[in-house]
Image: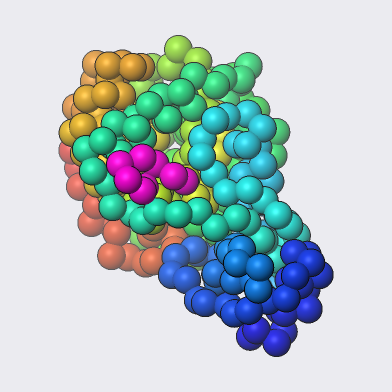
Amino acid sequence: MIHSLQPKLESILRTPLLRLQPLSGGCVGEVYRAVFNDGRSFVVKVDRSSTPMLEQEGWMLQYLATHSKLPIPDVIHSEPTLLVISFLPGASNFSEQSEIHAAELLAELHHITAPQFGLEEDTLIGGLHQPNPWTTSWIQFFREHRLLYMARVAYDAGQLPESLLKRLEKLSCRLEAWLDEPPHPALIHGDVWSGNVLADRHRITGFLDPAIYYADPEIELAFITLFHTFGEAFFQHYNELNGIRPGFWDIRRDLYNLYPLLVHVRLFGRGYLASVQRILDRLGV
């Protein structure tokens, strides 16, 4: 592997490559830590698939760098088959102080707004296409481009039974019973699970692998609860800073988590179907 990547990486970084170390994580291609003779380290992602898409990840990172103060890796090189970004210190272990810092960072991110919901480009989540057409109504956007879109992707891949697809379609027609339009579109990271967040010495040092768009920020908060990324310290401080609207914990958290659950159904199979079914049962659909 080092022999196939070495000339390209040395051309980009203009220094001899010492070694490549495989890293865990990432749904797109291979991930390595590249260490160079001058002591610098970078993360290298390689996509050898027939439809490489790493330039979209690079674009999302650059968008966050331009529009927010979120700590993210610097993009050194970006093309469909190869992404080189700075190596950030830290690990996915969060103290109460780092959770409070995460709340401050995401609360600030969620103050960044746009005229409509969506984004000027489509993005990725877990390597899957994520459509972002500008849409005036959040409920319409969530219905068409999150809930129904991913349900049909999972169904077409043979991972979602037709019976659950029909229940999700029925649910989509009743979203107004549970959702209101949020105060404004908010920029979200979109994929805040523990593997995508780094902390060091009680401070957040990096957010990785974004799936950005402008949304109801509650969909970000719901995702954080789904995989227990952060706990009580995070939510208490976030509520102090931005507020969490009444009804989130009762209904909207579960409703919004149908989207990442459907992503996981498509990516990882039917083991996540029971969670989808439990939410539909709870909503009476």
Residue in the picture at 27% in, 16% down: 240
Image coordinates of residue 219 in percent, x first then y, are 39, 33
- In-image side of 240 versus 123 (left or right): left
- Foreground residue, 192 or 129? 192
Task: Work out whether 105 lies above or below 225.
Answer: above
Image coordinates of residue 142 in percent, x first then y, are 48, 33
The residue furthest top is 183
Residue 212: name its quadrant.
top right
Count all numbered tags in the image, as a single digit. 0
Task: Work out whether 193 lies above or below 65.
Answer: below
Image coordinates of residue 255 in percent, x first then y, are 31, 35
Q: Which quarter shows the N terminus?
A: bottom right
Residue 237: name its quadrant.
top left
Residue in the picture at 66% in, 32% down: 66
- Foreground residue, 249 or 78? 78
Residue 205 magenta: yes
Residue in the picture at 34% in, 32% down: 101
Q: Is residue 261 visible?
A: no
- In-image side of 190 versus 60 (left or right): left
The residue furthest front is 38
Q: Which quarter shows the C terminus?
A: top left
Query: Which stretch did the figure color magenta?
Result: 199-206
Task: Work out whether 185 lies above or below 9.
Answer: above
Residue 68 magenta: no
Residue in the picture at 43% in, 70% down: 24
Q: Main secondary structure of the magenta part?
A: strand
